């Protein structure tokens, strides 16, 4: 440990692992440390099942749960959008070669007390029971407009300026009713509140296009999920970093960040060892005095021995409960993965309900989501604070990532990472660089 | 972006640092040997494919190196996933690399349950008389492992002794044991890799 590095990265969560990989690839000498003895921090998938039960202080699982080792349970639920930025990052870094994916089978939205499949193309829209006959026509016209829309070709804008006119105006142009607006905004454009209605329509159009482009890639839904769970993602980036020379240390408590002149970080201390460095990259848990609380998120992991009703027994699904449907300010997300992804024993399913906390009784807030799951064999609830850094790190050279909030998804993950990289190195990450190197290596 | 089924047989190298895993990898990829043993010599080694012809069948071995993670930390469990075979390497001149094999073996059976395991003693050129690790010791280790070990090899990366033979035999063992499995493998059980379609390759390298 007693050596000098260009950068020390603390924590092996997804963001830190991506950053570590990008720094190593850019030729920096990196030391990557975690206080835990496993990779992934909060983005780890817990295995075996016994460990999950222990973590939440529950009695050990009985034999009906099958082999504990067949389980890999994510602590933070997410899917990847097939055409989204995390997938692009995976492709550009070559990390995709370490992973295998399955498409998520269905995407549903909650409306009027029950769930309905999110219609994604004109054919599905016409068959959907989310809308009446005339509304279907209008929605179809709207989808056609979005699909034909090209940002650099104003002819396709059809007398509407999406850079100045807001989304409400676009909905009005097509005469879409409130219900249709609701699932379009929340289940297709994936907004978590209604602020987007008053902003220029361009962002929403882009998101809906992303949704349908992603869908076009693999069929059943626009979402992908990695075999063996999300914990494979940070590990893939950690391998990238190691391949390019990054040094890994686990199970290493960090006692202090050593500061030098002007409050600049010059190293980290663990016991009486000190590793010197020019910069530090870390998650909020390593620097409690340099972050502030931004909000709270509740997540509930549910172990089920059956699929979710009305999803055609899908082995994986996402259900979005738009805020308005249940009188809230933020959406509730329900996701389901199962034995088919090697994250649960045969015949088992893992449901996850999550949302941003709005009241003093968060467990009550997720009830609409839990109700959709049906009988739950075992439930683990966690409420966690999420944090953001108090400054940009330029002065201290300590660059801190934001916590994974309920509202956090892989898009914000990638944006945060790219932004941190840029602040830390003063340059944009050069994606073309790695791709070329890896190509060479493959010859 | 097509769904690509992965026909390669992933073969991973396991064992203490310094036993010669990267050297085996280098022999496999471009049949070279380097004596330097600094961290740098392992840089950039990831995985490499090579096709072996066994009887009337082709099989593609895809060899993976650890990336040197085992130096201080443990190897990620991901490394083991989807592997069909693991080469458990020790150094014939280094008894401690032999005595710690059981830990590596445990990792393999934990994270790559179905992988076939091959034991490989490297650096035959450094074996003295009497040998630092006796044949009896190696045999008794294999017995203790309840025949988890499919075969044992002695090689030298320096002299190139036994290396081609080892890989050919591994290919042969995999073809035989997998004959049925290879044919049955379906998208059902496996996921797919994300690959880049040609049209996207031409697209710029911007993330937005
Ligand atoms: C179990 C579960 C819980 C979820 N919880 C939440 C949640 O609490 N809050 C939430 O907002 N989403 C939530 N989602 C939605 C989900 O995280 C993301 O919308 C989806 O994963 C996007 O995948 P991606 O990041 O790979 O694609 P992205 O990379 O995000 O897609 C790229 C483009 O999509 C747009 N985009 C897509 N979704 C969003 C979004 N939600 N916010 C901003 N931009 C977006 C971005 O503009 C970006 O340019 C949840 C999903 C699941 C399955
Ligand atoms: N004499 C001799 N030396 C060898 C042989 N194989 C490898 N070495 C040397 O052993 C040292 C370690 O080899 P590596 O291939 O780097 O070992 P590794 O297991 O990949 O180790 P790390 O990457 O450092 O974890 C190097 O100095 C090699 O030159 C061999 O067959 N004979
Ligand atoms: Mg090596």
Image (tube, helix red, strand yellow):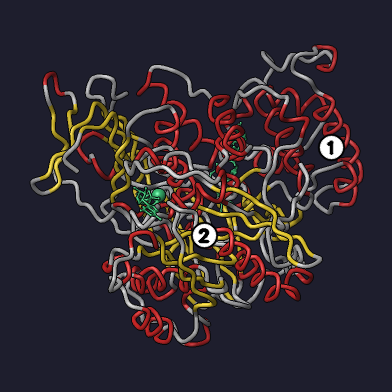
Q: How crowded is mark 1: few (under 14 residues within 10 Å), some or many (20 or more)?
A: many
Q: Gap between marks 2 and 1, in whole Å? A: 52 Å
Q: Nearer the viewer, residue B162 or A196?
A: B162
Mark 1 Cβ and ligand 1 under 8 Å apart: no
Q: Is A155 placed above or below A110 here?
A: above
> Tag 2, which chain?
B
Q: Who's the residue at 36% across and 57% down the image?
A: B19
Q: Residues within 10 Å of mark 2 (few under 14, many from 20)?
A: many
Under circle 2, the secondary element is strand
Measuring from the top left, give residue A313's x and y in whole percent.
73, 69
Under circle 1, the secondary element is helix
Identify the image quadrant of residue B98. bottom left
Specify the quadrant that holds the C terminus of chain B. top right
Residue A236 is left or right of residue B124, and the answer is right
Number of marks drawn: 2
Residues at discs 2 and 1 in contact (Cβ within 8 Å):
no
Residue A368 seen in this snapshot: no
Q: Who's the residue at 76% across and 76% down the image?
A: B180
Extreme residue toward the front, this view: B129
Q: Nearer the viewer, mark 2 or mark 1?
A: 2
Q: Which of A422 and A371 is in front in this view?
A: A422
Q: Is B39 placed above or below B128 here?
A: above
Which residue corresponds to mark 1?
A139
Which residue corresponds to mark 2?
B12
Q: Who's the residue at 80% across and 23% down the image?
A: A149
């Amino acid at each position: 440990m007693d050596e000098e590095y260009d950068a020390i990265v603390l924590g092996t969560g997804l963001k830190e692992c991506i950053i570590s990989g990008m720094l190593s690839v850019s030729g920096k000498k990196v030391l990557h440390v975690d206080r835990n003895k496993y990779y992934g921090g909060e983005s780890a998938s817990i295995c075996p099942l016994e460990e999950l039960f222990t973590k939440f202080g529950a009695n050990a699982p009985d034999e009906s749960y099958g082999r504990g080792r067949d389980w890999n349970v994510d602590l933070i639920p997410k899917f990847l959008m097939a055409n989204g930025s995390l997938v692009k990052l995976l492709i550009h870094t070559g990390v995709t070669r370490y992973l295998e994916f399955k498409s998520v089978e269905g995407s549903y939205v909650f409306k009027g007390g029950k769930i309905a499949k999110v219609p994604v193309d004109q054919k599905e829209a016409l068959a959907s029971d989310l809308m009446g006959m005339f509304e279907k026509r209008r929605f179809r016209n709207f989808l056609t407009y979005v699909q034909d829309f090209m940002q650099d070709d104003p002819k396709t804008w059809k007398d509407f300026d999406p850079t100045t006119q807001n989304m409400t105006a676009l909905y009005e142009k097509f005469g879409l009713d409130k219900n249709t607006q609701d699932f379009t905004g929340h289940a297709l454009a994936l907004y978590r509140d209604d602020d987007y209605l008053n902003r220029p329509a361009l962002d929403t159009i882009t998101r809906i296009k992303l949704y349908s482009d992603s869908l076009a890639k693999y069929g059943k839904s626009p979402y992908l999920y990695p075999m063996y769970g999300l914990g494979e993602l940070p590990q893939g980036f950690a391998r990238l970093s190691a391949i390019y020379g990054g040094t890994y240390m686990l199970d290493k408590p960090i006692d202090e960040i050593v500061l030098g002149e002007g409050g600049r970080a010059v190293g980290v201390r663990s016991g009486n060892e000190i590793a010197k460095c020019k910069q530090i990259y870390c998650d909020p848990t390593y620097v409690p005095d340099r972050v502030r609380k931004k909000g709270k998120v509740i997540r509930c992991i549910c172990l089920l021995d059956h699929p979710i009703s009305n999803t055609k027994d899908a082995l994986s699904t996402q259900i979005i409960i738009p805020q308005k449907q249940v009188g809230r300010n933020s959406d509730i997300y329900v996701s389901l993965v199962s034995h088919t992804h090697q994250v649960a024993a045969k015949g088992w399913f893992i449901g996850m309900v999550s949302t941003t906390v709005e009241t003093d009784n968060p467990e009550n807030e997720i009830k609409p989501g839990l109700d959709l799951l049906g009988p739950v064999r075992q439930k683990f609830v966690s409420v966690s604070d999420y944090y953001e850094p108090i400054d940009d790190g330029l002065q201290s050279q300590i660059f801190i990532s934001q916590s994974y909030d309920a509202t956090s998804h892989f898009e914000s993950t990638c944006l945060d990472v790219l932004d941190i990289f840029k602040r830390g190195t003063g340059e944009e990450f050069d994606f073309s660089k790695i791709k070329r190197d890896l190509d060479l290596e493959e010859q | 972006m097509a769904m690509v089924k992965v026909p390669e047989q992933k073969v991973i190298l396991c064992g203490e640092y310094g036993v010669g895993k990267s050297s085996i990898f280098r022999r496999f990829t471009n049949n070279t040997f380097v004596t330097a043993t600094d961290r740098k010599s392992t840089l950039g080694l990831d995985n490499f494919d090579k096709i072996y012809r066994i009887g009337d069948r082709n099989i593609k071995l895809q060899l993976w190196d650890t990336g040197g993670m085992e130096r201080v930390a443990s190897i990620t469990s991901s490394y083991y996933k989807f592997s069909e075979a693991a080469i458990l390497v020790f150094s014939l001149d280094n008894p401690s690399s032999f005595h710690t094999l059981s830990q590596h073996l445990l990792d393999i059976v934990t994270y790559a349950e179905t992988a076939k395991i091959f034991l490989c003693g490297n650096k035959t050129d450094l074996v003295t008389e009497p040998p630092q690790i006796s044949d009896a010791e190696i045999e008794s280790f294999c017995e203790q492992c309840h025949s988890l070990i499919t075969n044992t090899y002695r090689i030298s990366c320096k002299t190139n002794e036994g290396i081609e033979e080892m890989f050919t035999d591994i290919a042969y063992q995999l073809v035989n044991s997998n004959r049925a499995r290879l044919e049955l493998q379906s998208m059902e059980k496996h996921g797919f890799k994300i690959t880049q379609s040609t049209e996207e390759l031409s697209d710029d390298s911007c993330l937005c």
